[in-house]
Amino acid sequence: MMRMKLIIALLIAVSGVTAAPQAVGKFNELRTAAENWTRLNLLNGVLTVSAHEKQISESALFEASGATRPRALSAEEFRWNGRVAAGRTVEIKGVNGNVRAEPSSGSEVEVVANKHAKRSNPSEVQIKVIEHEGGVTICAVYPSGTPGRINECTVGERWSSHTRNNDVSVDFTVRVPAGLRFAGRTVNGEVSTGEMNGDVEAYTVNGGINISATGYAEAKTVNGSISATMGNANWPRDLEFETVNGDITLNLPEATSVTVDAETLNGGIHSDFPVTVQGRLSRRRMTGTIGDGRHQLRLKTVNGSINMRRGQQV
């Protein structure tokens, strides 16, 4: 009751500028709004008040007092969980928003997609799930806004999803069981992981990458730095780490044996491993071998330094 009196007193002060003939009516509006607001605050301590009822009372209070109501973010959540066979890939494809993966001690993949926007409707962006022989692919698919350019969810590197002035962001959080590969892709956002029990691939355009794997890893971006840790020195194929604006820091196992091609334009190249250089050594370009050079590693940036660190195990 004391809180209600204080609110009413405050609202009376706000309405003090109202012309005398309107004062009584204005006061009654404010009193009703204050009583509803106070009642809901009291109920919130012991009961669950419906969001709709609370919104009505809040709106009445703002409108009666003449205050400007701040515009809230619209939000929506999507969840999926399922089993994926060992050795298969969990692939996440976003457009606007971050992708974050964590290791899971369970047997099922768990995915949470949080959609939020200031002006667009989050429900317009669908989360598509494709379960296939190679694993599962989950995409944020925006409404198609350009004739002839249909947005869709596809498996692998290529997919189409144009935002067309849609400001919905989708942040993915994924829990991945051991023995599965993880591939995180987005356009405007970061890709990051915890210490994953498998292989990791990460791709973005505008955003940094920070990944860690007991297996091998690969990462590419345009605007952002890359930090990657690998626990396995036996790679099945050539690996590439590329960016344009940002540093590349690669933590490698002690037993690493690679032929490395590292290149930067504005930055330096540093290695904790002894490198047998092939050709001329320069500050911006280095080609050489670590160990017997059995695997291939390519590191490239334009504006940034390249660092190869030794013995950073997962």
Image (cartoon, helix red, strand yellow):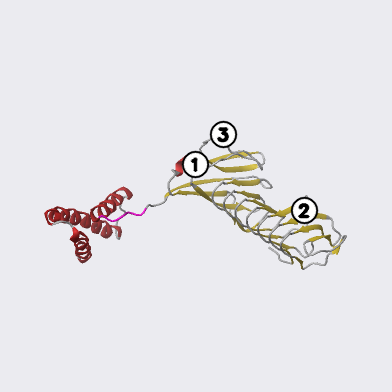
In contact (CB < 8 Å): disc 1 and disc 2: no
Single out the residue that lies furthest toward the right. 279
Tell me how far mark 2 sits from mark 3, CA to CA.
37 Å
Q: Which residue bears the numbered disc 2? A: 235
Residue at the location (51% across, 48% down)? Answer: 170
The earlier-in-sequence mark between 3 and 1 is 1
In terms of depth relative to the viewer, which is nearer, 76 or 84?
76
- SS assignment for the magenta stretch, majority: loop
Tell me how far mark 1 sits from mark 2, CA to CA.
37 Å
Helix, strand, or loop for circle 1?
A: loop
The earlier-in-sequence mark between 1 and 2 is 1
Residue at the location (73% across, 59% down)? Answer: 265
Left or right, 287 with reference to 227: right
Q: Which residue bears the numbered disc 3? A: 150
Answer yes or no: is residue 104 visible.
Answer: no
Q: Which amino acid does label 3 sit on?
A: Ile
Answer yes or no: is residue 82 visible.
Answer: yes
Where residue 125 is drawn, which disc sits there?
1
Helix, strand, or loop for circle 3?
A: loop
Q: Give the range drawn in magenta.
A: 66-70
In terms of depth relative to the viewer, which is nearer, 89 or 190?
190
Residue 208 lies, in percent from the top left, at 61, 57
